[in-house]
Image (spheres, rainbow, N blue to C red):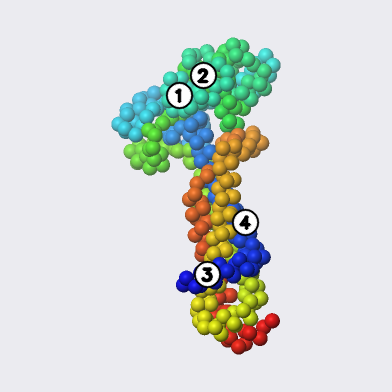
Amino acid sequence: MHLLVRLAVRNLVRNRRQTALMGAIVAFGTWAMVASWGLTDGSTASMVNAQTSLDTSDLQLHRPGYLDDPDLANVFSRAQLAQLKATLRGYKVVDAVALRLVSEGLLQSAYGSQGVSVRGVEPDLEARVTQLGQRVVAGRLVSQPGEVVLGQTLAKKLDVRLGERVVLNVQGVKRTRSEGLRLVGVVHAGLALLDQATAFVHLDDVRQLTGVEGASDVVIALNPGANAQRFRQTLQRALGDGVEVSSVFELHPLISAMVRIGRFEMLPMMLLLAALAGFGVANTVTFSVLKRLREFGVVLALGLRPKQLARLITLETVFVSLAGFLVGALLGYGLNVYLERVGINMGFYSGTFPDLGIPQVIHAKATWVHSLYALIVVIVTAVVASRYPARRVSNLEPTEAMRYV
């Protein structure tokens, strides 16, 4: 075996052009696989982190059907909220619970108007279920009734500044009501829905405007390290059919689709890249074998057995594939490290499709696990690609092979 390894290395060094071509093919395929996996996993993680930390938190409770038809008549009553809070206090995994009452409204300033999603929050508890306070670029968050916080984009559009007053019109259960609010804070969340079309006000203000005493959302933050999906299933069984328990994946179907793509639908693309790389490697190896038939005949005449010659071809293919893998993995990992730090600006897509929940900047995910996946694909592809040329040389007759020029 040691002799075969030495011969394989010598042949690769001697045939530099074919070696470089095969290595480049494998390197490109590896780079594409590592970069694609890193970007897909990173995009999903960026979307999940942005939504859970700034908007949805870990879990939310709603009345059945509310997410499909967010009607004020389909919200939790005060009695139901008290019962839900008592139930949640029994779980040690729950870190904080906050109530929200969401409605639609029209926000007016002296210079314009804008339809908005009105989000009534409990200031102290809201600060425990999201990190929106870390995205305040001017002023502060809501602390008492009569105040409003707007996204940076919305504040610029309405040309309203800290301390100025705006009028909020909300369609309540029975009639439209209006209230003057003072702008106390501006946030830049990086989520288009929050920056462009959401007004954050005190829960008591929204209850007064809508005439609703309950809440539409019960927002739950879990302790660090808790499995949100597993607890969602546990809580759903405990609460029964009268309550819908939703994680970020149910609240944002695009994120769920991205996870599915990353776990399953990326596999066909990876197999296609592997097939293309394998086809290129097989062609190059076959061409190299045809050029070296006379050489192989001499080697066979000197005593190398046909099976050993077949192993030699396989070793050459595997060695050059490993070299190409190292180059491609380093380039792919380097690209993922760069995109993990710098990110990709998705401002156009997040602004054009705010309901999709795409953050303004997404980041790739740099991990050597992606390279491990690619290595498995490369090794399998190299062995498969070398089978036909190896079988061909194993059937050579020395005297017939030495006639080739």
Asked which secondary structure carries label 4, the reply is: helix
User: Mark 2 to mark 1: distance in Å?
Assistant: 10 Å
Q: Is residue 307 visible?
A: yes
| Mark 2 vs 1, N-terminal side | 1
The spot of residue 27 in percent (x, y) is: 60, 57
Of the two numbered discs 3 and 2 in the rendering, the one whose residue sits closer to the viewer: 3
Mark 4, residue position: 28
Mark 1, residue position: 126
Question: In which image quadrant can residue 110 be found?
Answer: top right
Please report contact status of discs 4 and 2: CB closer than 8 Å, yes or no. no
Question: In which image quadrant can residue 395 be found?
Answer: bottom right
User: Mark 4 to mark 3: distance in Å?
Assistant: 27 Å
Label 2 Cα neighbours within 10 Å, binned few <14 / some 14-19 / many ≥20: many
User: Mark 3 to mark 2: distance in Å?
Assistant: 70 Å
Asked which secondary structure carries label 3, the reply is: helix
| Mark 3 vs 2, N-terminal side | 3
Tell me if residue 85 comes above or below residue 138 in the rendering.
Answer: below
Of the two numbered discs 4 and 3 in the rendering, the one whose residue sits closer to the viewer: 3
Where does the C terminus fall, quadrant-wise?
Answer: bottom right
Label 4 Cα neighbours within 10 Å, binned few <14 / some 14-19 / many ≥20: some
| Mark 4 vs 1, N-terminal side | 4
Please report contact status of discs 2 and 1: CB closer than 8 Å, yes or no. yes
Tell me if residue 149 comes above or below residue 257 in the rendering.
Answer: above
The spot of residue 5 in percent (x, y) is: 51, 69
Mark 2, residue position: 141
Q: Is residue 276 visible?
A: no
Mark 3, residue position: 6
Q: What residue is shown at x 63% (from left), y 68% (from top)?
A: 14
